[in-house]
Image (tube, rainbow, N blue to C red):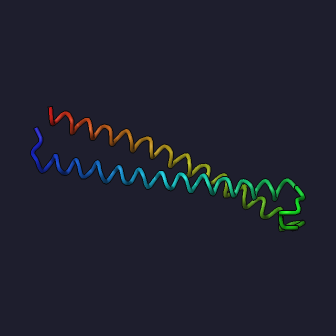
Amino acid sequence: MMNHKEKEFLKTEITVKTAHIKNLGNWLRNSILLLLISGTLGFWGLSGIQDRFLPDITGPGRVAVGWIGSIIAVLTFIFGILVFVAIQNGRKHVLQLINTLKGVKK
C-alpha cells in the first residue's frame, strides 16, 4: 500500500511525462516538416527539373544542394522514426503508471 506522499509523487510523474510526450509530438511535427523540405530540395537538385519558379542553378552547385538535401532527408527520417518510437513507449509507460495509481486506489 502506498502512502499519500508516494501517490502525489506518482501523479506528478504522470503529469511531467505527459508534458514530455507532448513536447516529443512537436519534435515529430518539426522533423516531418524538415523531411518534406529537404526531400523536396534533394529531388529538385538531383532530378534536373527546370521550372521558372525555382532558382536557375546549374552544374555542381545544384547537385551539391541535391545531395545535401537527400542526406538531411534520410537523417531526419531516421530521427522521426526514433521520436515516434519514443512517443509510443512513453504513452505505454504513462498508462502503466496510471494503472499502478488506480490499483492503489482500489
Q: Residue at point 67% right, 58% down? A: 72
- 24 above or below 103? below
- Residue 92, position in %: x, y? 37, 38
Q: Quadrant of residue 41?
A: bottom right
Judged left or right of residue 77, residue 83 is left
- Residue 54, position in %: x, y? 83, 63
For the N terminus, the quadrant is top left
Q: Residue at point 27% right, 41% down? A: 97
Q: Residue at point 12% right, 41% down? A: 2
Q: Quadrant of residue 42?
A: bottom right
In this view, which residue lies farthest toward the top? 106
- Residue 82, position in %: x, y? 52, 48
- 88 above or below 30? above
Q: Residue at point 35% right, 49% down? A: 18
In this view, which residue lies farthest toward the front? 53
- Residue 48, position in %: x, y? 88, 56
Judged left or right of residue 45, residue 69 is left
